[in-house]
Image (cartoon, rainbow, N blue to C red):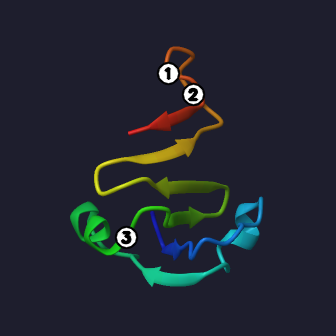
Amino acid sequence: MFGVALRSYGRLYSRNTSSLIFYGKPLEIKGLDAGQIIAKVEPLDLIVWDGHVIIILDKERTIESRLKYDKKQGPVRVG
């Protein structure tokens, strides 16, 4: 499912995923399991694929927005 994570370097990002896929320094995560991905990413890295972005908050939490969501949880999830 995931193909590339991006290192932020304190810069502003594009607002659409089609541009974000090519932004920053890629970290190859395709084919890795969740534990291997967690070991590679750092806070504020982005995991991006067409139409979706996950922001790494720390080694235990991410933030993402979903178009289809549960009204109880809302469209933005920290988990």
Tell me what residue is drawn at x 48 percent, y 73 percent.
Answer: 3
In this view, 77 is above or below 8: above
Badge nearest the viewer, 2 or 3: 3
How many marks on residues? 3
Q: Which residue type does callout 3 highlight?
A: Val
Please, is residue 65 above or below residue 15 in the view? above
Report crowding for label 1: few under 14, some 14 to 19, many 20 or more residues within 10 A (C-alpha): few
Residue sitting at x 60%, y 38%: 66
* Label 2 close to label 1 by CB (< 8 Å): yes
Q: Which mark is residue 3?
A: none
Q: Distance between the residues labelled 2 and 3?
A: 26 Å
Of the residues shown, which amino acid type is indicated by label 2?
Tyr
Task: Write down the quadrant of residue 75 in the picture.
Answer: top right
Q: Earlier in the sequence, mark 2 or mark 3?
A: 3
Of mark 1 and mark 3, the one earlier in the sequence is 3
Q: Which circle, 1 or 3, is nearer the viewer?
A: 3
Residue behind mark 1: 73
The local secondary structure at tag 1 comes to: loop
2 sits to left or right of 19: left
Give the labeled residue for mark 2.
69
**Label 3 neighbour load within 10 Å: few <14, some 14-19, many 20+:** many
Amino acid type, label 1: Gln
Check disc 3 and report the residue beneath it. 41
Q: What is the quadrant of residue 65 in the picture?
A: top right
The kind of secondary structure element at disc 3 is loop
**Quarter of the figure that contains the N terminus:** bottom left
| Residue 79 in the image: above or below residue 25 | above
Q: With respect to residue 35, does 25 lie above or below? A: below
